[in-house]
Image (tube, rainbow, N blue to C red):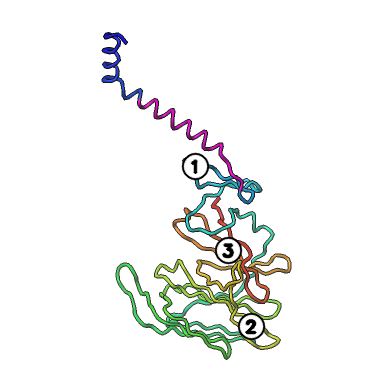
Amino acid sequence: MSRDRKKAFREFLQSDGYLLVFTVVCALTLCSYFLANKEFEIENQREVLGSSALRGVWVNSGTGIECPEMRGLDVEGCITDSYFENFNEVEGASVNYDREGRVVYSNDEIFVSGIFEMKSVLNNDVWKDVYLGNLNLKINSRQWVFEDVVWNKAEEPVLDIVSTDNGYLIIFYPSITLTSRTKQFWIFEYISEDDIVKNLSFTDSEGDRAYIESSYVSVLQYGEDTFLRFDRLDPSLMGNVEVTLYEFNGGLELFRSFLLLKE
């Protein structure tokens, strides 16, 4: 290269070299993006994007619904409200704490009573009239004690009674956090013919016992099958809802779990 050309090139780098660097970086980024998005893997009929800026998003080839992958979330896929179009919700009776922290329900077959035993109280600018303690729950002649539950005087429901072909499902869900966003669920079955109350256990896909912490529950009917639907709300889900279905067939077996997308 002649001395004049070297001098001109040096002057270009000093004055406009940043433009060259910017152009090269952009070109390399675009090439990497297009190459990465051509690398699809098939996992359980899902097209999984390769390593790119869009990694962590999978597309279910069966439904075409894009589903964001959430860290620490164990679901099968994503659904919308249309999934539940053929399910019918079974109405029941909801029972709140009264102003004294008691829970009472009765009919011709069952008598349910609960007494909250206060251990401590939070009453400040952040937490108003929030109580921590144990709750003694009695269903007919059987009794249970639930420790370290949270109660405030907002009178949120804590108990649902739902009729079944054989008797009743008694769904108890005390709050276990100060925000009342997370509740712990306990399911009891009253069998009218035998006049007995059973504590039902949840079992996961491996057949092991599971414990349910969620936000809301509803009882659904699909044909002759009965399901319990648990909806978990969490700010990290960005407005979506984690939904878990358990089938009621003498016990409570995990059926499916999804991320319900907001519409």
- Residue 139 x/y as whole percent: 56, 86
Above/below status of 17 relative to 184: above
Look at the numbered discs 3 and 1 and tell me whether their residues touch, using CB distance below 8 Å. Answer: no
Q: Is residue 170 left or right of residue 13?
A: right
Q: Is residue 33 magenta?
A: yes
Spatial CA span between label 1 and label 2:
53 Å
Name the residue type under label 3: Thr
Q: Secondary structure at mark 2?
A: strand
Check whether the beta carbons of the residues at disc 2 and disc 3 lie within 8 A of each other: no
Describe the element under mark 3 as helix, strand or loop.
strand
Residue 244 badge: 3
Q: Is residue 16 left or right of residue 177?
A: left
Can you tell which of label 1 and label 2 is closer to the viewer? Answer: 1
Residue beneath the point at 59% across and 44% down: 41
Q: Nearer the viewer, residue 193 or 32?
A: 32
Mark number, residue 190: 2
The label number, if any, that marks residue 51 in the structure image: 1
